[in-house]
Image: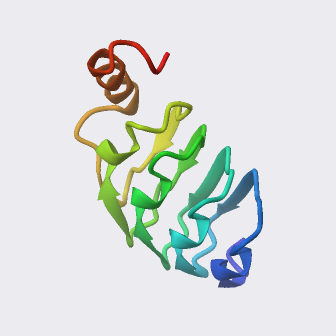
Amino acid sequence: CDELTGNIEVFEGMQLKELKFGGCENLEGNIEVFNGMQLKELTLRSCWNLKGNIEVFKGMLIKELNLEGCIRIKGNTLGLAGCPNLTTLDVRNTKIVEPIPIKDQHAVVQELSGDTLA
């Protein structure tokens, strides 16, 4: 999709369940557009011109999130610990900090909540 141009803001207000883009270097916009969507899978691999903070996904029921190579996206994965369905997370080559793997984050959240999230 290296020839694709445009802005992801066209998706605002849509109720997408799955969206996959890879290598769309000319795709622009802020991932804030996904706030409130019922996304289960989101892949934006190597979409260099996308920006925003992964806090937008906090509390979502997203299962797979691949932002590998999105060099302008930032944040801290600790904010995603409250995403109970998140099993696959790829934030390599981004400005996103992942202090501990997401599966370990889920375990800590469950332990602190007395397993009420399970």
Residue 54 visible within the image: no
Residue at screen point 43% across, 16% down:
116
Q: Quadrant of residue 104?
A: top left
Residue at screen point 59% across, 72% down:
33
Q: Is residue 43 above or below residue 12?
A: above
Coloring scheme used: rainbow
Q: Quadrant of residue 53?
A: bottom left
Q: Is residue 82 above or below residue 105?
A: below
Residue at screen point 26% across, 33% down:
100
Outermost residue, left direction?
Answer: 99
Residue 12 visible within the image: yes
Give the tally of numbered discs: 0
Provide residue 5's location: percent of width, then percent of height: 69, 85
Provide residue 69's location: percent of width, then percent of height: 45, 61
Provide residue 36's location: percent of width, then percent of height: 60, 60
Residue at screen point 66% across, 46% down:
41
Residue 9 relative to residue 45: left or right: right
Provide residue 110's location: percent of width, then percent of height: 36, 19
Q: Is residue 35 above or below residue 106?
A: below
Which image quadrant: the N terminus?
bottom right
Residue 59 or 45: which is nearer the viewer? 59
Residue 23 or 116: which is nearer the viewer? 116
Outermost residue, bottom direction?
Answer: 6
